[in-house]
């Protein structure tokens, strides 16, 4: 057992000591140590990574709808919010990843997302949604039914969310 403790100490601490010291030195050049010390690990993770919980009402309140016919704004958007309201947190994270390039929101939620989340009426009909991650834009085509929108949106976020992902 003593051997395993020594091995773990070596692999998890001693072996990477130089790298960790250089990382901390660089981090402290950007953020002074006394400022970091006021946060515990959970608060620091929230500041660095954002929030994991996605609130659909916050999403709906802060999303900007751009363009579209009466049918798009009154029917398609109603179906979109109904679909999104039924999504699990994992599916919401995939939608966010598909549209923004990140599966998490910044602290403060959709209100602090920059640029604002936009849903753009795409000039297509019954095709897969597309996204412009640099601009936080979801390009949503016109659909004939809730079922069609549900099917194609889920397909897009499950199969198309890794376009710029790391290998």
Image: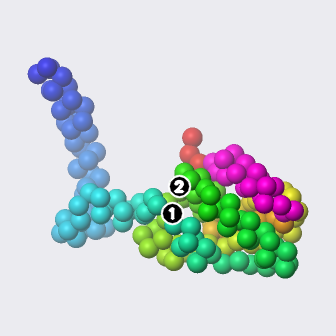
State the residue in front, 29 or 53: 53
Task: Name the residue at 85% across, 78% down.
Answer: 69
Q: Is residue 163 left or right of residue 152?
A: left
Query: Visible in this render: residue 163?
Result: no
Question: With respect to residue 41, does 106 lie above or below?
Answer: below
Query: Visible in this render: residue 77?
Result: yes
Separation of residues labelled 1 and 2 (CA atoms): 7 Å
State the residue in front, 120 or 165: 120
- Image quarter hosting the N terminus: top left
Question: With respect to residue 82, does 3 lie above or below?
Answer: above
| x then y, percent, for residue 165 | 59, 48
Question: With respect to residue 112, does 106 lie above or below?
Answer: above
Task: Name the residue at 15% across, 26% down.
Answer: 6
Q: Is residue 2 left or right of residue 32?
A: left
- Image quarter hosting the C terminus: top right
Secondary element at image label 2: helix
**Residue 97 located within the stretch drawn in magenta:** no
Secondary element at image label 1: loop
**Residue 150 located within the stretch drawn in magenta:** yes
- Quarter assignment of residue 48: bottom left
Asked if disc 1 and disc 2 are in contact, CB closer than 8 Å, the reply is yes
| x then y, percent, for residue 94 | 59, 53
For mark 1, what is the residue? 54
The image's colouring method is rainbow
- Quarter assignment of residue 122: bottom right
Magenta residues, start to end: 143-164
Which is nearer the N-term, disc 1 or disc 2? 1
Q: Which of the labelled discs sits on residue 89, or is there none?
A: 2
User: Crowding near pointer 1: few (<14 within 10 Å), some, many (20+)?
Assistant: some
Q: Is residue 93 left or right of residue 158?
A: left
């Amino acid at each position: 057992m003593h051997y395993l403790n020594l091995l773990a100490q070596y692999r998890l601490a001693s072996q990477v000591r130089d790298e960790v010291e250089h990382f901390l030195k660089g981090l402290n050049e950007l953020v002074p140590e006394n400022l970091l010390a006021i946060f515990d690990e959970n608060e620091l993770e929230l500041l660095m990574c954002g929030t994991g919980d996605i609130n659909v009402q916050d999403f709906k309140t802060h999303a900007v709808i751009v363009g579209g016919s009466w049918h798009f704004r009154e029917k398609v958007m109603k179906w979109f919010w109904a679909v999104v309201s039924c999504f699990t947190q994992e599916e919401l994270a995939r939608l966010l990843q598909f549209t923004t390039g990140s599966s998490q929101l910044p602290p403060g939620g959709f209100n602090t997302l920059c640029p604002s989340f936009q849903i753009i009426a795409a000039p297509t009909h019954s095709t897969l949604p597309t996204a412009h991650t640099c601009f936080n834009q979801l390009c949503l085509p016109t659909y004939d039914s809730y079922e069609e929108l549900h099917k194609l949106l889920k397909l897009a976020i499950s199969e198309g969310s890794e376009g710029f992902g790391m290998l």
